[in-house]
Image (spheres, rainbow, N blue to C red):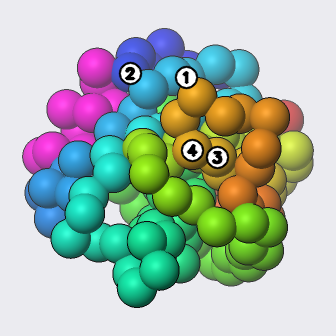
Amino acid sequence: MTTASVDDVNAFLIEAFPAAAATGIRCEELGTDRAVVRLPYDEAAVRPGGYISGPSMFTAADTALWFACFTVIGIEAMAVTSELSIRFLRPARNGDLMARADIHSVGRRRIVGTIELWIDGSPDRPVAVAQGTYVRPLSSNVSR
């Protein structure tokens, strides 16, 4: 595990990817091979029917996995998504969207993890699950 802190990750996001930071998404927690993000509820991003949109949920999942990669290789802008699939389980409504990514495999070039999403206050009622792979930058080719 690297020594990056939640504050380090959030400061990095503001500097390196201001458009994402403008959505309010932020790292809430880092741990061994995992990260939790919060995407604040935004009435403007809610689709008809009062649901948090699929693209918003995808963003939270992808960002959580990116941040979880930082716990393995350090804060690295060029760790990039190779693939990510998401399954929507139930409508996401009326609250901040939370996403927890857990790393399951770290290879020389790829990092694989799963992500669970829920509305804040209801971690026992996931609204979606995702699985993804990140490609490590060549400068961090150390497997474990």
Residue stretch in magenta: 7-17
- Tell me: 104 left or right of 22: right
Disc 2 to disc 3: CB gap under 8 Å: no
Q: CA distance from mark 2 to mark 3?
A: 20 Å
Q: Are marks 3 and 4 in contact (CB under 8 Å)?
A: yes
Q: Closer to the N terminus: mark 1 or mark 2?
A: 2
Of label 4 and label 1, which has the lower sequence position?
1
Q: Main secondary structure of the magenta part?
A: helix
Q: Quadrant of residue 6?
A: top left
Residue labelled with disc 1: 30
Query: Is residue 67 covered in magenta?
Result: no
Q: Position of residue 43 (x, y in %)?
A: 25, 63
Which amino acid, by three-letter code, is at mark 2?
A: Val
Name above or below for residue 10 compared with residue 106: above
Q: Residue at x 28, y 20 (%)?
A: 7
Q: Which mark is residue 118?
A: 3
Q: Residues within 10 Å of mark 2 (few under 14, many from 20)?
A: some
Query: Which is more foreground, mark 4 or mark 1?
Result: 4
Residue 6: numbered disc: 2
Asked if 83 appears above or below 70 in the picture, the reply is below
- Viewport quadrant of the N terminus: top right
Q: At 80% across and 34% down in the image, what residue appears?
A: 124
Judging from the image, what secondary structure is the residue with disc 3 in? strand
